[in-house]
C-alpha cells in the first residue's frame, strides 16, 4: 500500500516516471528482468503515445493518464509465468468476450509480433 501511495503522489514528470519504471525493472529477478526490459522496449516503440509509470508496483503504460497495459512478474504473485495485462482503457474489444491478459514464459519473435499488434490495437 505504501508503494501505491508513492505512485499516486509521484506527480506527472515523464522523466521521473520513466526512471521509476526502469528502476523497477532493474530490481526484478531473472528471467523477469530480461522480459520486462524487452517488453518495455517493444511497448515504447510500438506506441510512442504511451507514457511509462508504475501501477501497483508494476511497470505500466498509460495514455492520457489512464493505464492501458502493464507487466506483472511471475515473482509478484509467485506464479509460474509473467503476465502482460490490459486495462479496460485498451481498445481490444471483440464481440462480447476477449482476453485482457496473456501469460508469458519467454519472448520469441512470434510473441513479440503479437505484442506489437496488441499494443497498437489497444491504443487505436
Image (cartoon, helix red, strand yellow):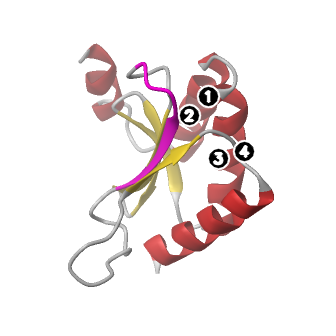
Front-lying residue, 14 or 101: 101
Measured from the top left, where is residue 108 in percent x and y?
Answer: 76, 52
Q: Disc 3 vs disc 2: Cβ atoms closer than 8 Å?
A: yes
Residue matched to label 1: 25
User: Does dot 2 land on a helix, a strand or a loop?
Assistant: helix
Quarter of the image holding residue 6? top left
Residue linked to disc 2: 21
What's the residue at 70%, 67% (across, down)?
113
Give the mark count: 4
Of the residues tagged 1 and 2, which is closer to the observer?
A: 1
Query: Image quadrant of residue 54?
Result: top left
Image marks 1 and 2: residues in contact by CB distance under 8 Å: yes
Q: Which residue is drawn at 60% across and 20% down?
A: 28
Q: Mark 4 points at which residue?
A: 38
Query: Relative to the observer, which residue lies in front, 16 or 102?
Result: 102
Q: What stretch is highlighted in magenta?
A: 78-86
Crowd rating for badge 2 (residues with CA inside 10 Å; few <14, some 14–19, many 20+):
many
Q: Does the magenta stretch include residue 85?
A: yes
Picture coordinates of residue 114 (x, y %)?
62, 67
Amino acid at each position: 500500500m505504501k508503494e501505491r501511495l508513492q505512485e499516486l503522489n509521484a506527480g506527472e514528470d515523464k522523466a521521473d516516471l520513466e526512471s521509476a519504471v526502469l528502476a523497477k525493472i532493474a530490481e526484478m529477478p531473472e528471467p523477469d528482468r530480461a522480459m520486462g526490459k524487452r517488453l518495455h522496449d517493444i511497448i515504447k516503440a510500438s506506441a510512442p503515445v504511451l507514457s511509462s509509470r508504475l501501477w501497483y508496483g508494476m511497470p505500466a503504460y498509460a495514455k492520457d493518464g489512464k493505464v492501458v497495459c502493464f507487466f506483472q512478474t511471475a515473482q509478484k504473485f509467485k506464479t509460474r509465468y509473467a503476465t502482460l495485462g490490459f486495462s479496460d482503457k485498451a481498445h481490444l474489444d471483440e464481440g462480447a468476450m476477449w482476453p485482457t491478459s496473456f501469460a508469458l514464459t519467454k519472448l520469441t519473435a512470434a510473441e513479440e509480433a503479437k505484442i506489437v499488434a496488441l499494443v497498437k490495437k489497444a491504443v487505436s
